[in-house]
Amino acid sequence: MGIVNIDDDLHDQLRRASKVSFRSINAQAAYWIKLGMLCETNPGLSFPEIIERELSAAGVKAQPLAETDA
């Protein structure tokens, strides 16, 4: 484990996002880093596809929302 130096603005964004996501600042940073790595190593996949793949690999069965008639 080590220390990562980031600028104050990015740290502020991490702090704000962590509150919304109910994560610690470190957990939010780790989440963004992992997603960034997954996006860079899987450029043909969209963000929702990456999330779906990760959830599936973890054994989470997310059901899509039913379409509503408008």
Image: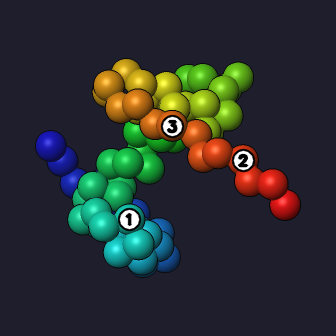
Identify the amino acid type marked 1.
Ser
Q: Nearer the viewer, residue 33 or 22?
A: 22
Please tell me in which quadrant of the rendered image residue 15 appears. bottom left
Tell me which numbered mark, 1 or 2, is placed earlier along the sequence.
Answer: 1
Q: Are marks 1 and 2 in contact (CB under 8 Å)?
A: no
Label 2 secondary element: loop
| Side of 53 where 67 appears, left or right | right
Q: Mark yes or no: residue 9 visible.
A: yes
| Side of 16 where 65 appears, left or right | right
Label 3 secondary element: loop
Q: Nearer the viewer, residue 2 or 65?
A: 65
User: With respect to residue 15, does 5 lie above or below?
Assistant: above
Q: Mark yes or no: residue 40 visible.
A: no
Quarter of the picture containing the C terminus is bottom right
| Side of 70 where 36 appears, left or right | left
Label 1 secondary element: helix
Q: Nearer the viewer, residue 58 or 69?
A: 69
Identify the mark at residue 67; answer none if there is no mark: 2
Q: Mark 1 sits on what residue?
A: 21
The tally of labels here is 3
Tell me the CA gap for discs 3 and 2.
12 Å
Q: Mark 3 sits on what residue?
A: 63
In this view, the residue farthest toward the left is: 1
Identify the amino acid type marked 3.
Gln
> Mark 2: few, some, or many residues within 10 Å (few <14, many ≥20)?
few
In this view, the residue farthest toward the right is: 70
Residue at (42%, 45%) from the top-left corner? 33
| Side of 3 where 12 appears, left or right | right
